[in-house]
Amino acid sequence: MVRPRFLVIGAGPSGITAAKVLTEHDFNGEKVDVLVVEEGERIGGTFVNKAYAGSNLVSSKYITCYSDFREDEKVADHPSIPEYVNYLERYAENFDLHKYIRFGIKVIDVISSNSVSPVHKTFHKDIKPSNNHQNATQSHLFHGIGSRKHKVILLDINTGKKTIEIFDGVAICSGLHNVPRIPHFDNENCFNGKIFHSSSYKSPFKLSNDKEEREGNVKINKQTSSSIHSPKKDKRGFQKESMTSKNEKEMSKSFFDGKKVLVIGSGETSFDLAHDAAANNATSVAMLTRHGFVSVPANFPGTSLPPLDCLIMNIGTHAYESHWAAKTNFHWWLTTKIQRLGLFAMGGSTYGLNQWAGKRYNMTWDRGNKHIVNKSGKCMGLINRSVKANSPFLMKKLNEYVYSGWDATVEGVGSEEGVKLYHPYKVSHFDPDGKSIHLQHVDTGVIEKVEVDVLVMATGYVQKFPFMENRGSLSPKEAEAHPNFKNEDKDSPLPSEHFILDPNEPTIAYIGFVRPNVGAIPPMAELQTMWWCTRLKHQEVKFYEDHDDTDLSPERARQKARHLRRLRLSGAGGLGDMPGPRSKPYYCLDGSRLSYAVDYG
C-alpha cells in the first residue's frame, strides 16, 4: 500500500522541525513520505536570506532550541545568526532530514480537489506530471484525511521547469518574516536619495543583490548594488560571522557616511540599523515611530543575571495560575507594578530599561503582558543622549551618578545629538524638492519638514501566501469574507482552529505563524506540528497528562517540562487539554520528575 505523502513548504526553522515530526508519525500503521521544498539553496529561511552583519538571536538559546536537540553550552546565550544557522544544519544532520529536502524549488500554486481523477485535465501546457503523481493518486485514504487531495505546482528555479505533484497533506512553513511590508507615500518618486527596506540590508557597506531589491519594490543606488557578491563562508559552507571583510571596509565607503539618515520603525532591526548609521559617520540619524516601544535588552552585560526570557519564565508567573487569577489578570496587575518600579530603580524610567523616550502609547500600570518587548537595546543610549542632556536637574544628576553605566556602550558613537526620535510621528508625504520628507505628528497634526539622504524602511513583514491565492477551493463567499487575502498592505488571514488549520480542510496546516511576546517560534512550530498530527488521527489532543510521567527518565522529563513551559510562556496552552498555563496547585507536591522540572527547571 502506498504511503500518504506530505509536502512541507520551506526549510527554515519551522519547516525542518515539521518534517522531522511528520516522519515520526504514522497513520493506520503507515509511515509518512515527506517532501520539503525550499526556494533557497540551504537550510535556514529568513536567518539566511534576511541576516545582516552583527545580528544575533533576541531570544536565548535556552528557549529557541528544539525539545530534543539542545545547543552547545559553549555557544553564547544569544547566538549570532551564523551560529544559529549552524545549529539548524546540525539538527537536520542529526535527524537525517537532508534527504527529504529539494532546494531551488518554488511553490506556484496549491489547489485542493475532492477527487483526484480530474487532476490530469487541469495540467497547463508547460507543466508535466512528476513521477510521483501516479503513485500519489493511488495513495490509500488514512484516518483523518478522507478523499481530499492537493495538487501542487512546483517551479525549478534553476531550469525554469514546472511540474505538478499530488499530496495528502500540506504544511505551510513559508515563514512569518518573508514578504517585506513596504509602505508607499505621495511624491515618493520625486525623492533623489536612497530608499531601501531593512530586508535587503547586509552591512553598512552592502545591500542584497539587484534582483532581490527590485522584487522588494525599493529604490537602490546602482553603484552600491552592482558591487555586491555572495557572503563569505567557512570550510563547512556556513556563513561567517562578519558579512563584510576588512578589505571591503578599507576599500568601500559606507552608504551612511556623511548622510542624513531616517529610519522608519522602532523594533530590534530599527535599533540595529540606526546604531550602524551613527557608528558609520552619518551626519545625522533620526528614528520615526508612531506608537512607541518598550525597550528591555535581551541580556544584561556585566551582570550574572540570566537572559531576559529566562527571568520571565519563573514559577511565580507561569507554574501556577488559578482560574480566578486568569479571569481577573490579578498577577499581571501586581507584577506590572513591581516590574515598572524595578525598571525605574535600575534605569531611571518606567517605560523600559534605561528608556527615557518613546513611551509605548498603551503603556499603563494595570497589566504589562500586552506589549511586544524590543530586546535589542543597542540604540537606546543614542536616543537617550539629547533627552538626558535636557532633562530636569534632579534626573540629570541621577543619570550622571547612578544610571550612566547603561550608556557606556555607545560612548564615542555618533554625533553629540545621538539619534533623534520622532514620536509619535508618521510620514505625511515626500517633498517635490527631492531631498525632504514631511513628517506629521499623530496627535496634533503638526507637519515637520526633515532633510533626508537615506531612508531605511524597517517596517517589518506582511503575512502572505501567494501560492494559496488562486486556489480552486476558495469560494466567492470565502474570498469575500477574507478581503485581506490579496490586500498587499495587510496580513493574509490564518485559519480558525488555533490559527493552524480550517476544520473543513484539516490536511493543510499553517506552521510557525505565531507572534509570542516573549518566546521563540521554532519550538512552538514543533508543538504545532505535533498537535496537527494528532488532530489528523482524530484523536483527542493531549500532550502530557498529570499521571503519565512517573516512569520517565530525567532527560525525558526535562524535555516534556520545556514543552509545557513554552506553552505557558507563549499563551499556547489552548493546544489541547494539557496542564496548560494553569497547573494544579498541588502539582509540585505529587513527587513526579516532570513537576519538579516544570517548576524549578
Image: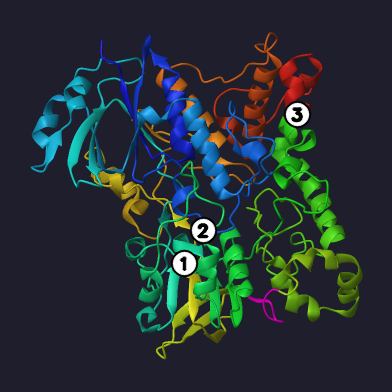
| Residue at figure coordinates x 21%, y 25% from the top left | 132
Dot 2 and dot 1 residues touching (CB under 8 Å): yes
Q: Which image quarter holds the C terminus?
A: top right
Q: Nearer the viewer, mark 2 or mark 3?
A: 2
Badge 1: how crowded within 10 Å, few (<14), some, or many (20+)?
Answer: many
Residue linked to disc 1: 206
Q: Which image quarter holds the N terminus?
A: top left
Q: Secondary structure at mark 2?
A: loop
Badge 2: how crowded within 10 Å, few (<14), some, or many (20+)?
Answer: many
> What secondary structure characterizes most of the magenta part?
loop
Dot 3 and dot 1 residues touching (CB under 8 Å): no
Relative horizontal placement of residue 168, taking residue 397 as reference (left or right): left
Relative horizontal placement of residue 139, taking residue 69 as reference (left or right): left
Residue linked to disc 2: 243
Residue linked to disc 3: 601
In the image, residue 452 lies in the stretch drawn in magenta: no
Relative horizontal placement of residue 391, taking residue 195 as reference (left or right): right
Q: Is residue 204 visible?
A: no
Which x, y percent locates residue 558? 68, 23
Q: Which residues are magenta?
A: 413-422
Give the amino acid type for the residue marked by disc 2 in the picture. Answer: Met
